[in-house]
Image (tube, helix red, strand yellow):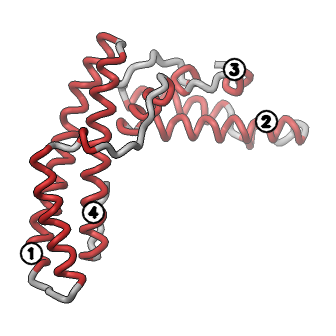
Amino acid sequence: MRLRNIVHSLNYYEIFGLERKLTIDNGDLQKRFYELSRQYHPDRFQTKSAAEQQAVLDKSSLLNDAYRVLRDPVQRAEYVLKQEGFDIGEQRSKDVPPELLEEVFELNMALEELRSGDDTARTQLDAARDKFVGMRQEIDDGLAALFAKYDALQDRLALSEIRAALNRRRYIGNLVNEVEKELNVDIPN
């Protein structure tokens, strides 16, 4: 891909010459990224004008942003959703499984107990965190099937299902983060 095309193409998939799918080969993406990174590395343009050097820095930054988004399945899905006009990041109660609402209530009670000095609530919070981490993993596992469905159909219904799963994932992730903050434990998202 020519350097000029990177700036004109704000579509991350086009930058790497990839078909817009949610299931991608991360090894292939990485190979394309390294190839483009070498080709457009700012050090290769040191003898060019200041304007050309700045343009290469801008393009290199765009390339890095595109790679960062496309290599992460959740960010990749959010990117496609945004391109298709979906609002993302909304926390809607209809996307939260009803059975989770009672657990959230119990979680909030345990958090209050811990905040008020009752250290026995730690055990309950540890168990809740582990359960929510497991639920988030189940959603992540299910995303692969939803991605394949979208890739096959390329329709908005599949994207709606993905959006709902991502909203549930975000909701559960926020619960995990809240518990970890109170327990002062770091577990990667």
- Pick the quarter of the image with the C terminus: bottom left
Q: Which label sits in the foreground, 1 or 3?
A: 1
Observer able to see residue 40: yes
Check disc 4: other Cα within 10 Å, few if <14, some if 14-19, many if 20+. few
Q: Amino acid at mark 4?
A: Ile
Question: Is tag 1's residue or tag 4's residue first in the polypeptide sequence?
Answer: 1
Residue ranking furthest to the right: 49
Observer able to see residue 30: no
Question: Is tag 4's residue or tag 3's residue first in the polypeptide sequence?
Answer: 3
Q: Disc 4 marks which residue?
A: 187
Count up the numbered dots. Answer: 4
Q: Amino acid at mark 3?
A: Asn
Tell me what residue is drawn at x 9 percent, y 65 percent. Answer: 127
Q: Secondary structure at mark 3?
A: helix
Q: Nearer the viewer, residue 127 or 32?
A: 127
Residue 110, position in %: x, y? 15, 73
- Pick the quarter of the image with the N terminus: top right
Tell me what residue is drawn at x 12 percent, y 65 percent. Answer: 106
Q: Amino acid at mark 2?
A: Ala
Q: Which label sits in the foreground, 2 or 4?
A: 4
The residues bearing labels 1 and 4 have C-alpha atoms spaced at a distance of: 17 Å
Q: Is residue 187 above or below residue 98?
A: below
Tell me what residue is drawn at x 29 percent, y 76 percent. Answer: 184
Q: Secondary structure at mark 4?
A: loop
Q: Amino acid at mark 1?
A: Thr
Mark drawn on residue 123: 1
Q: Disc 3 marks which residue?
A: 5
Mark drawn on residue 55: 2
- Residues at discs 1 and 3 in contact (Cβ within 8 Å): no
